[in-house]
Every structure is written in structure tokens, then in C-alpha cells.
Amino acid sequence: MLEMRGVDAFYGDSQVLFDMNLAVSSGEVVTLLGRNGMGKTTTVRTIMGIVRTRSGTITLNGTRIDQLPSHAIARAGIGLVPEGRQIFPNLSVRENLIATARVPRHGVPAWTFERVIELFPALGARLASAGNQLSGGEQQMLAIGRALLTNPQLMILDEATEGLAPLVRREIWACLSSLKEARQAVLVIDKNLEMLIGLADLHHIVEKGSVVWKGTSAELRADRSLQLRYLGV
Amino acid sequence: MRSQLTPAHAVSALLISLCAAVPYLASALDEPFYVIVFARIMVWAIAAISLNLIMGFGGMISFGHAVYLGIGGYAVGILAFHDITSAWIQLPVAMGLCAVVALVFGVICLRTRGIYFIMITLALAQMVFFLSVSAERYGSDDGLNILWRSEFGSGIIDLEDGAVMYYTIFAALLGCLLLQWRIVVSRFGMVLRASQSNDTRVQAVGIPTYRYRLAAFVIAGVMCGLAGFLQANLERFVSPDMMNWHRSGELILMTVLGGTATLFGPLVGAVVFLLLSEILSTITIHWHLVFGPFLILVVLFARGGVMGLLGSRAARD
């Protein structure tokens, strides 16, 4: 589905991604792991066209997307839940959800407004509230709901549980599990290794802007020295 | 969606009722002067509403918005000068010209942001301003008198009748308020507002915001062109001063004073701005010395403008 091959990306003159390789297949949950500042969010920003590649290719279902503008990449089928939520504070919850909603060109939309509210009943109770009146957890649910309503082929969640109360975190993890059950392809960045190992099919460890290790949950769980060296856990 | 009544709602309803009743009140008080004052206020309110659409809801601070007032006005003036007085020609020409100019300006301006956007809108508007100054045939600096108001060719809308002129402006104001509300609550308006708060994010969820912003820029230009058409008819006069950068600044002040990103803010701002300047100017010729600090106080202490003070919730009141 999504494939990054030999991608180099820069912030100004500083190179931040070095020969980055990454693949997410249909129906798979894949993680990007690594310490802070290693290039995980930059990888996501590069996939979304916010940071431009200088070499290498990014393809979605075999079609190159690395030269497309951001909105066209999203339209090609990638839904992003960005770090820090970044919901629209001046729009109500309902408006946040429907402003950017999209139905697939062919077939019935997998995600509808009603289904998102079913997934996050807390949002249903606050439809008229402005985005900036929500708690951190509600904002995160809104950001996920907003991305789901674009009916993406691939969902990317960047630090989806960061800074949330344990109870809300549990709700977000439950949401991710139900996405996996629904065979939704997901690329997820998070610091909770235990939960990620339980959830994901494949893991990538990012160190200094490139993938230094790739493997399954069982392989990652078994290798304590790897966890210690690259993840500090 | 249930809406809670706020003082902002009451003030908005009061102002609309006042605008509707002014000809009767002025007649009862034997002060016909107030009819023309309120007609002017309503025309400026239409122009401010159009600016609010892009500035308040879209974050595009145009410092050249009065150019469309001038273009709308000159469309009436120049056509009347050539004995074309039919409103069915003048109005489409005024609005069509504004659409074309706004489209061209928008294509250029919307590639920039922040201070650059402000400066480019100012520069482009000043180009048109100097074009009108150099048009000697159409009065140059002195402007152009309009002998006959636009003719709709029916017995119902005769703009030569002062009351009809007034209520035509009033109807246009209501129409613009309604259109603004429809736009703001539509999906188009949601994208526009979302783009104001985080344009990159809107694009990252698949919306090509440039097109939305450009469309809003053109709609605002056309709406302001309508205000220009009405102003030219009301005053029977057009001059380059209509599109001077001072006028664009006044439009910004009215919108900020009333409350940006609120539906009735521009109307409230136009009423406060024009009435206050009218009243203060009768007291002293140095009225700017009072008016200036007042505006500074509003900006400093009432960030949501008058509507903010009255408890308005942006985009809904």
C-alpha cells in the first residue's frame, strides 16, 4: 500500500531523513519507534508532503505521491492524526468532523458521521461545543474522528496518546484495536511500547533519520538489548 | 442546534429594527438628515460585511478592499456619463468587473501571507486608485457627478424616490447578512474558517484551500462592488477617494470595532464608527483626537469588538 524507498529529506540545508525505507501493507498496523528527535514525525510530515523529499520515492498503491501537494496526498487516501491534535479551535465539534469529510469515489463509505459518534460517544454529547472547549482526550478523539471521516486507506497517528489521562488513553487504544479488527491500515507513532507490541504487526525503529531495525512484535519483545539501545526502555 | 440568547442578539435585532424604522422616525422627528446618515451606514456595513467574510472568517486582511467600492461606483458613474442608466446593465457590470478584478488580484495576493498579503492588496488597490485619478475624462481627482440614478425600468424600484433608495439599500443589507450567514455555516465556510486557524492542517486532510480562499476573495469583492453601486447612486457622485487606502483602513476599523468573525459585527462597527465620527465632528474639528484613542482602547480591551463585549460567540451571532 504505502512504500517509502530511499527517501532523503531536509529542513533547509539540514538533512533530517537519510535513505528512509518504510512499507505498510493493506490491513496492517505498523509502528515507527525511536527516541525523541530521531525523525519519526518528520517521516510522517514527509509522507504528507509537508516536508519535501530531495531523493527517493513514496508510493501509495503503486502511484507516486511524493511530488503531489499535501491536499492531493490526503485525497489519494491518507488520513493523518497529527501530533498535538491540531483540531480547528474556531469550529464546533460537528463542523470539525464534517468540514473535511470525504466519501470514497466508489462504494459505500466505511466511516460515516454516525459511526464516528458511535465510536466516540463523548463527542456526540459535545457536538455544538467549539474545538477549543474540549479536553485533551476529546480533542484527540475529534482528531481521530476527523481523519476517519475522510475514509482513508491508510491512517497515520502521530503520538495519539501523548499527554492524555490513563482512562482516555485506554479509550484511544481500544479505538486502535477496533481499527485493526476492521482491517484498517494504520501507521502509528507512540511511546507505549507494551501497547504497540500487543497491537502492531510490524515495527520500525528510527534512529537519526533512518530505519535501523524492522521486525515483528515477537522479535521486538524478545530482544531486550535492542529495546534498551534504541528505545531506552 | 439550540442557541442561547445573548445581549449581542438583542443589539443586532435592535439595529436591524432601527434601520428599518429610520425613515419613519426621522420624519416624526423632522430630521430627514438621519435618513441619509443611516443609508450611508448601511452601505458601509455591506462593504464591511464583505471584508469580514475574508478577514474575519478567512484571515485575509485586505488593506485594499475599498477598491471594489470604487470600481462598483465608477461602473455606475462612467456608464451614466455615457447615458447608459439602466440598472440591469450597470449592476451586472459593477459586480462583474469587481469579480474579474478580485479574481486577478486574488490569484496574485493569495500566494502570500501575513504582512505581504496586506502590502500587496494595498499596492494593487492603489494602482486602481491612481488609474482613476489619471482618468481626466471622468473627472480625475474631482470625481464624477451622476445626474440620474440607476433605472430599474419598473414602477416599483424608482431610486429617484428617497424612500425607495433607502429601502433598496436596506434590502441589500439584509440580503448580504443572509448570504454571509449561509456562506459561514456552509461546508465552504467551515473550510474557510478552518483554513484561518491552520491552513497547512486543512490541506493535510485533503482540502485544496487556495481555491476556497480565492472563491471567498471574489465573493467579497463582488459584495463590496454592490456597496459601491449603491453608494454611487446614493451620493450621485463618484471620486477616486472612494477607493483611497484611507477608506480600506476605515473598513478594517469598522470590522474590528464591531467584532471580526461575527455575523452582525460589521453592521455594529459601521453604526458605531460612522455615528460616533458624525457626532464627534459636530462637537470639535479635532474629533480625531478623541476618536483615535477610543479605537485604541477598543482594540486593547475589547478584542472581540463591541460584539465580543456583548457576549457574541464568533461565527454564530
Image: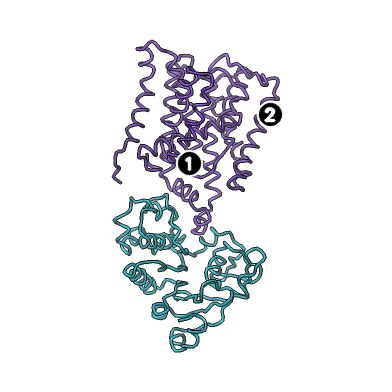
Chain colours: A cyan, B purple
Count numbered badges in the picture. Answer: 2
Image height check: is B191 above or below A210?
above
Secondary element under disc 2, as helix, strand or loop, is: helix
Q: Looking at the rendering, which quadrant does residue B225 occupy?
A: top right
Residue at 66 percent of width and 70 percent of height = A55
Q: Earlier in the sequence, mark 2 or mark 1?
A: 1
Give the side of residue A126 with respect to residue B54, left or right: left
Secondary element under disc 1, as helix, strand or loop, is: loop
| Chain label for disc 2 | B
Give the side of residue A121 with respect to residue B131, left or right: left
Give the residue at mark 1: B56
Give neighbour class at mark 1: few <14, some 14-19, many 20+ (Cα, 10 Å). many
What's the residue type where badge 2 is placed?
A: Leu
Give neighbour class at mark 2: few <14, some 14-19, many 20+ (Cα, 10 Å). few
Residue B149: percent from left, percent from top:
53, 17
Residue A208: numbered disc: none
Image height check: is B66 above or below A42?
above
- The CA distance from mark 2 to mark 1 is 29 Å
Q: Looking at the rendering, which quadrant does residue B175 occupy?
A: top left
Give the residue at mark 2: B131
Residue at 40 percent of width and 69 percent of height = A161
Residue A224: percent from left, percent from top:
46, 88
Image height check: is B76 above or below B294?
above
Residue B311: percent from left, percent from top:
35, 40
Q: As rendered, which of A127 and B311 lies closer to the eye?
A: B311
Residue B281: percent from left, percent from top:
50, 19
| Chain label for disc 1 | B
